[in-house]
Amino acid sequence: MADSTAMYLDLMKKILTNVIYEDPPLPNPWLPGDAFDRIDRLAGLDWPSSAHTMIGIRRLDNVQFCVERILADGVPGDFIETGVWRGGTCIFMRALLRAHGITNRLIWCADSFAGMPEVVDGHEGDVELATHAFNDLMGVSLDTVKQNFEAYGLLDDQVRFLPGWFKDTLPNTPIRRLALLRLDGDLYESTTDALVNLYPKLSIGGFVIVDDYLIDVCKEAVHDFREDNNIHDEIVEIDGYGVYWRRTA
């Protein structure tokens, strides 16, 4: 990789996580405190007030690893994230395509753009988790996400948006083939919706990344899907929170 490309991508990660200007975290029940902590931000543990992603540097490093392996191996397909928040991870995917001169792949951004669904009659763990209570933070509008892409000069016809609940949008998505499936929907039902509808479109050699694997209901959904579909590819830990695997069959 040319030095200028490496420097660009490294700077993108620092800006997307905002370890440069060190915006303070928003209050949350899992990580109290109102001062910027570099270790927490690098690990993707806090809820940034301004940064465009909350996944931290190591999980961005993992996205870069998967994308560059896909490009090096010629694995066909587009890239998607289900649950994009402020758009930072998808922005980084688009930056990776730009940095490597790739013009024949798309970045798909799937999100309600209105926050998390309120689960009343669904999976018991989803009901208990009650993530909709944080929709003041989690609900980022489509216009805001597009503006964030524009701020980096990365909003173009290689970026596509799928607004709505996964159960409504993913069964009918126009995506033909995927090389990267990144899941960030927290809930059992959201994770299952993404896997059931999108995994069949994932190319052999493509990657699945699960951002929320540490959350019990998300892990349960992943293992239920893998068991139902006889998937035995090794699950690899990223940072104690997220995991990934590469499709071999």
Image: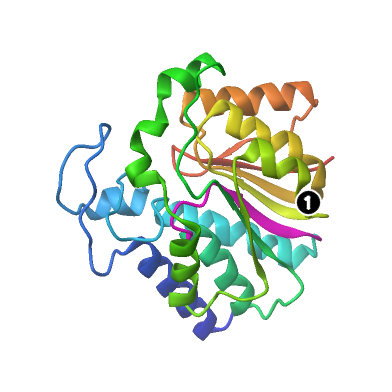
- Is any part of residue 90 visible from this angle? yes
| Residue occupying image coordinates x 76% and y 54% | 178
Disc 1 residue type? Gly
Q: Position of residue 171 (x, y in %)?
A: 76, 40
Q: Is residue 232 above or below residue 80?
A: above
Residue 95 appears in which quarter of the rendering?
Answer: bottom right
| Residue occupying image coordinates x 67% and y 74% | 157
Rendered-image quadrant of the C terminus: top right
Rendered-image quadrant of the N terminus: bottom right
Residue 57 appears in which quarter of the rendering?
Answer: bottom left
| Residue occupying image coordinates x 51% and y 52% | 84
Left or right for 56, reference 25: right
Q: In this view, does 169 lie above or below 24?
A: above
Identify the residue under disc 1. Answer: 205
- Is any part of residue 194 visible from this angle? no
Part of the protein shown in magenta: 76-87
Left or right for 148, reference 195: left
Secondary structure beneath disc 1?
A: strand
Say how the picture is coloured. Answer: rainbow
